[in-house]
């Protein structure tokens, strides 16, 4: 049971904007620890999508952006494309668990 | 180019042991934390363990504490995960991942290896 909760699925038509929430608590996101985001395409290893203060690794398009408020964070995908169909995970650190935690994961479907 | 190549997975009986290896290349191995993350079949990601770049600090998920040991060999740039007293719930793909920083509670993981499958079953 993850301490970071995400919606199981979100969907949108090509070109639309979708958002994925990541709800935590005062011992992780609310404590000020960074929230990072990963994309996992079917059958492949996860890939870092956004890290730190809204940084994108080289090669990640600016269609992906994030935000954070209180004990929650969000990932937004604008101009949704078929290649964005994947599972997405948030990740942070939890001081109560003294370890790193991942979100429950969200499957993005492009209609 | 950073490359991580895991090996050592396989089928093991409950209560058995297995040692995973992760050969790293393309970066200064001692400058970055290294971590193990696993994924049970059809499930989400679960962080397992991390070791700082210097090797001076380690952390484990409660689910593996006392059973798994992380280590690293700087002479051949390899990360290890010794897994003892294995249980059925330890079954999954184990990924090796390079930390974004040497040692930080704000660490992220990039890149990841291709993973190695561990199956615990009688």
Image: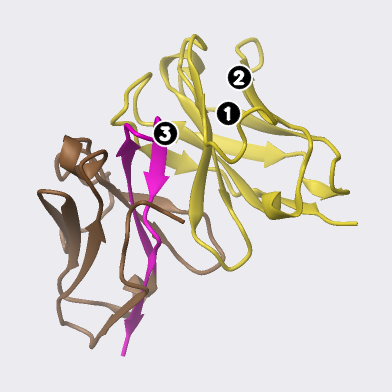
Residue B42, image x, y percentages: 58, 68
Secondary-structure class at tag 3: strand
Q: Residue at x 62, y 18 (%)?
A: B72
- To which chain does the residue with label 3 belong? A
Residue A22, image x, y percentages: 25, 58
- To which chain does the residue with label 2 belong? B
User: Circle 2 sits on which residue?
Assistant: B77
Query: Extreme left residue here?
Result: A69
Q: Which chain is brown?
A: A
User: Do the dots labelled 3 and 1 sit on one chain?
Assistant: no
User: Circle 1 sits on which residue?
Assistant: B24
Label 1: how many Cα within 10 Å (few below 14, some 14–19, many 20+): many
> Does residue B9 lie above or below A106 as drawn?
above
Tell which circle, 1 or 2, labels the residue nearer the N-terminal end: 1
Q: Residue at x 17, y 82 (%)?
A: A15
Q: Residue at x 22, y 46 (%)?
A: A56
- To which chain does the residue with label 1 belong? B
In this picture, which residue range is highlighted in magenta?
A: A87-111
Residue A91, image x, y percentages: 34, 47
Q: Is residue A29 left or right of residue B25?
A: left
Task: Look at the image and tell me in which quarter the C terminus of chain A lies.
Answer: bottom left
The residues tagged by marks 3 and 1 sit, at their Cα atoms, a distance apart of: 23 Å
User: Circle 3 sits on which residue?
Assistant: A99
Q: Which chain is yellow?
A: B
Q: Is residue A42 left or right of residue B32?
A: right
Asked if marks 1 and 2 touch (Cβ < 8 Å), the reply is yes
Asked if marks 3 and 2 touch (Cβ < 8 Å), the reply is no
Asked where in the image residue B91 lies, by quadrant, the reply is bottom right
């Amino acid at each position: 049971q993850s301490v970071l909760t995400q919606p199981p699925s979100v969907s949108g038509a090509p070109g639309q904007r979708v958002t994925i929430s990541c709800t935590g608590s005062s011992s992780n996101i609310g404590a000020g620890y960074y929230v990072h985001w990963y994309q996992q395409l079917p059958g492949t290893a996860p890939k870092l999508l956004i890290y730190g203060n809204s940084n994108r690794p080289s090669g990640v398009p600016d269609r992906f952006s994030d935000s954070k408020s209180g004990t929650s964070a969000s990932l937004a995908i604008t101009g949704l494309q078929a290649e964005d169909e994947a599972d997405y995970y948030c990740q942070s650190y939890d001081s109560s668990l003294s370890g790193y935690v991942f979100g429950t994961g969200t499957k993005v479907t492009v209609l | 180019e950073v490359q991580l190549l895991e090996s050592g997975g396989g089928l093991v009986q409950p209560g058995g042991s297995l040692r995973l290896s992760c050969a790293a290349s393309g970066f200064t191995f001692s400058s970055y934390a290294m971590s193990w993350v696993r994924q049970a079949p059809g499930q989400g990601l679960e962080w397992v363990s991390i070791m700082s770049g210097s090797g001076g600090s380690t952390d484990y998920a409660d689910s593996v504490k006392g059973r798994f040991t992380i280590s690293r060999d700087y002479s051949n740039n390899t990360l290890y995960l010794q897994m003892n007293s294995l249980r059925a719930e330890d079954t999954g793909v184990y990924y090796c991942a390079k930390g974004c920083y040497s040692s930080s509670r704000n660490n992220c993981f990039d890149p990841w290896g291709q993973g190695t499958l561990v199956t615990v079953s009688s």
